[in-house]
Image (tube, rainbow, N blue to C red):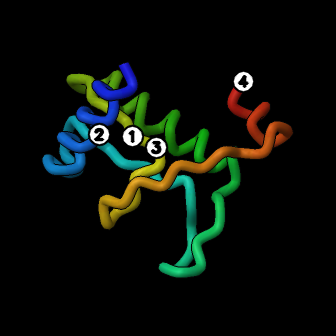
Amino acid sequence: MEERLRLKERIAIEIGESYYHEWKSAFEGPDGNKKPRDVKEVRYDMAKTLAAFSNADGGELFVGIEDDNTIIITLFHKKRNSTFK
């Protein structure tokens, strides 16, 4: 399963953002000085994008892919992560 997800990520990155694919960064700030975004802000961006997909033809949301196509995985602190529940 994990290998299939990695393949899907690579294919999505090669295709790039489009009507059906959207990247959301979990970080903010200039290159070399990126800091984790506020969880509520990330959650709000995710909700807006998913609502837009549901009002259209659907799509895929990838969180943790930067505009330059680098994949950044971050683990939120347990206390902060509870915001997603």
Q: Quadrant of residue 37?
A: bottom right
Residue contact between numbered discs 1 and 3, judged by CB atoms under 8 Å: yes
Secondary element at tag 3: strand
Residue contact between numbered discs 2 and 1, judged by CB atoms under 8 Å: yes
Q: Earlier in the sequence, mark 1 or mark 4?
A: 1
Q: Nearer the viewer, mark 2 or mark 3?
A: 2
What amino acid is labelled 2 in the image?
Answer: Glu
Residue located 39% across and 40% down the image: 62
Dividing the image into 4 quarters, which one contains the N terminus?
Answer: top left
Question: How far is disc 2 from disc 4 in space, using C-alphas?
Answer: 24 Å
Give coordinates of residue 19: x percent, y percent. Answer: 19, 41
Q: Quadrant of residue 83?
A: top right
Q: What number is the disc on residue 63?
A: 3
Residue located 40% across and 54% down the image: 71
Q: Quadrant of residue 82?
A: top right
Residue indicated by mark 4: 85
Q: Is residue 79 left or right of residue 50?
A: right
Question: How far is disc 1 from disc 3 in space, using C-alphas?
Answer: 4 Å
Question: How far is disc 2 from disc 1 in space, using C-alphas?
Answer: 8 Å
Mark 4, other Cα within 10 Å: few <14 / some 14–19 / many ≥20: few
Dividing the image into 4 quarters, which one contains the C terminus?
Answer: top right
Residue indicated by mark 1: 62
Q: Earlier in the sequence, mark 2 or mark 1?
A: 2
Q: Earlier in the sequence, mark 2 or mark 4?
A: 2
